[in-house]
Amino acid sequence: MEFQDRLAALATKVSNQAAAIGTEEATKNAFVMPFISSILGYDVFDPLEVVPEFTADVGIKKGEKIDYAIMREGEVQILIECKASTGAPKIEHASQLYRYFATTNARIAALTNGVIWQFFTDLDAPNRMDAKPFLVLDLLDIDDTLITEVQKLSKASFDLESIISSAEELKYVGALKREIAGQFREPSDEWIKFFAQRVYEGSYTQRVREQFTALVTKASRQFLTESVNDRLKTALGAGVSVRSEAGDAGAVTSGPVAQGDLDRDTEVETTLEELEGYQIVKAIACGETKPQRVTHRDAKSYFAVLLDDNNRKPIARLHFNGRQKYLGLLDEQKTEVRHAIDELDEIYSHADAIRAAVIRYR
């Protein structure tokens, strides 16, 4: 199995099991050890490669233990500190990593809750672990641009010089991407003022700040939506003929369908969250049909996921316009039942019903 496939398989396991993991030990067994074994490629049962509860006396701190030390030719290569998956890993959890980093030969340290992996090195000062990670891997939202960098940490591909040389760029590019994403979700006063002063000629008063808070938020979301739509138009604009199970007579041309989805109702604002929800439903539905048959239509009241772009073949409806999000599923009589969801990942818990809907229309 290729590295990317192994990473995807572990990500699926984490997505399916994260809600059931409640302790640090359970996190280690379910997520951390499989990551060390299947992703990094080390034998977790070989003490010459992986040492659990690694101990090294640090000043007056005697007998302190770090969760795992990955060894190479008798020297510590990577230090790993674990926390329960129920909470996000925070830098205040890394005090032991700081101390051990300074007293071993390790140049790489990892802080993880099994879901999010934060990797550190010593860019700011030699032999002193940085306060900010140079690489952050979220198994529930994998950034494809980081896969090659993660692979460099594996036993088969470990290249310390390459890791360190690219770490500084990774550190700041990653931090900037996370900061930009945060500003799009919830713009700060500085972000709002930055844009307001470029389009508004009057004084930046409290009233103007309040007005532009809503405007910048709306403009940011529309910009993201339009960017996604532009990419869809570019990818599908030429049209791709797909042979249906009935043969050439039933061919579906995805280009015009996608274009029609984008242009159908100019008063409807398709959000990035709706498109992400659609991709999850589509991924589930593709277990029972060809991906090209799963399409979407957005309306003012809900975002519909359809089979064959046919309103009489609804797979699911996404009600994401209100404060509470709902996933609408229809039974054999086309009666809709709404299920409240807080996170998009909760759609996966309704996978059986989504697949059943597709099977009914086949």
Image (spheres, rainbow, N blue to C red):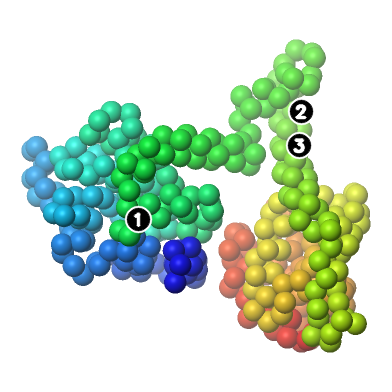
Q: Earlier in the sequence, mark 2 or mark 3?
A: 2
- Position of residue 113 in the picture relative to residue 76 (left or right): right
Q: Callout 2: helix, strand or loop? A: helix
- Checking the image for residue 211, the label placed there is 2
Q: Which residue is mark 3?
A: 219
Asked whether the beta carbons under mark 1 and mark 2 sit within 8 Å of each other, the answer is: no
Q: Callout 3: helix, strand or loop? A: helix
- Checking the image for residue 157, the label placed there is 1
Q: Residues within 10 Å of mark 3 (few under 14, many from 20)?
A: few
Q: Residues within 10 Å of mark 2 (few under 14, many from 20)?
A: few
The answer to whether residue 88 is visible is no
Residue sticking out furthest to the top: 203
- Checking the image for residue 113, the label placed there is none
Q: Residue at x 91, y 57 (%)?
A: 264
C-alpha separation, residue under disc 2 versus residue under disc 3: 13 Å
Q: Nearer the viewer, mark 1 or mark 2?
A: 1
| Residue type at tag 2 | Gln
Q: Residue at x 28, y 28 (%)?
A: 125
Q: Nearer the viewer, mark 2 or mark 3?
A: 3
